[in-house]
Amino acid sequence: MQKLFERIDGLEDAAVSLTQDLIRIPTVNPPGDAYVPCAELIGERLRASGFDVLYERGEGTPGDSDRHPRTNIVARREGRRPGPCLHFNGHIDVVEPGEGWTRDPYGAEIDDGKIYGRGSCDMKGGIAASIIAAEAILQEGLPFDGAIEISGTVDEETGGYGGVAYLAGKGFFSKPRVDHVIIPEPLNVDRVCVGHRGVWWAEVCTHGHIAHGSMPFLGDCAVRHMGAFLEKLESDLYPALADRQTAMPVVPEGAKQSTLNIASIHGGLPDNFNGLPSSLVPDLCKVILDRRFLIEEPLDQVKAEIIGLLERLEKERPGFRFDVRDIMEFEPTLTDLDAPVVKAVSEQIEAQFGHKPDAICSPGTYDQKHIFRIGQLKDCIAYGPGILDLAHQPDEYIEIDAIMTSAKVMAGAALTLLSGR
Ligand SMILES: [Zn+2]
């Protein structure tokens, strides 16, 4: 391994300039800008290292159009003989920069050992680290069995439908093609992320009856009905959620309990209205709920709990009418701590840092959900450089040291997993 690690050290300039090149392509999602040049940058570079490269457009997936094609890249390099395949999957999309930057979000400026830019940490630094890891193995001429795959996929930030979900539906994340997956998301360079909580997004509407605002007694106010529902959430649901703790190692601490965010509320006048209101009793009010649930909670129970509160109101409160629409749902995922990819990466982290890594779970979901559910592949983790808390923040950066160390961990783990040991 020592020669491999020295080779990686020698590739530091290459790792930095690759990360910079990726940051300078503004793959902002939504809408899904510049996916093609970013996919081609990764694909053509890997082709030069002997990878077979495929571009797979998630045709017809949400947001896909000729102007904003959902173009993914999947590259595969065969080893000396058949064997297992290790796949590195990174999402190429980034969120918009937002306010508060003191650097150019697409300038990829270097300062004090850090590269700044939108997507530097989440997760172009991680993609660069996986590419450098593979290049180092190939340049050293180290023999491996099976195959190494690297993909750059789209739309993770908006659910991954045109990216990993689309590819998983075509068999790209299933056996026998792939055996082990590492997703280099920024979860801190000395931790292994083995899963995430579940998510249910739903829209709840309450209905009323429209009338003149000066005679509200002739109507029925949907906003007041919603108020009654929100009160029920406060009095009944939030205390119950606070009592539920998961055995999963979710970070940060507050996310070990079940959570509910009321993501939006709207009733009455249209959004962005700034004229004079007409005098009306609103007959519709909507909230969007973002419910994050634990592996100990079945999804049907999570839904039934909220629908139960609404049904109680229907009995208790005259005129209360509601409906609930599912927007998105994903079950929690948890990779076995004894899984080969967890062990291989943990061993390498320990070798680099001198201590055993923490196995953690993410509070939110990421593309692992599609690999589990659609690909039916359980040997999957997130591991990569970058500080989790910097994701989506202004002045996001990636530490060059972390890119280099994680590249060593990834390369070492690849040799372990592909050596048939
Ligand atoms: Zn990410």
Image: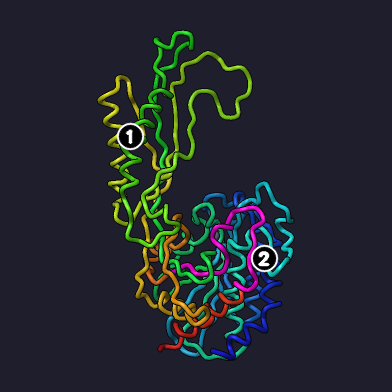
Q: Residue at x 45, y 88 (%)?
A: 419
Q: Position of residue 413 (x, y in %)?
A: 48, 80
Per the image, label 1 sits on a secondary structure element best described as helix
Q: Is residue 31 magenta?
A: no
Q: Earlier in the sequence, mark 2 or mark 1?
A: 2
Is residue 178 shown to the viewer in this render?
no
Q: Is residue 349 left or right of residue 93?
A: left
Mark 2 against mark 1, which lies toward the viewer? Answer: 1
Q: Which residue is mark 1?
A: 235
Q: Which residue is mark 2?
A: 22
Q: Residue at x 42, y 76 (%)?
A: 341
**Which quadrant of the picture is home to ligand 1?**
bottom right
Indicate the amino acid at tag 2. Answer: Leu
Q: Residue at x 41, y 41 (%)?
A: 202
Is residue 230 shown to the viewer in this render?
yes
Q: Position of residue 334 (x, y in %)?
A: 36, 64
Indicate the amino acid at tag 1. Answer: Ser
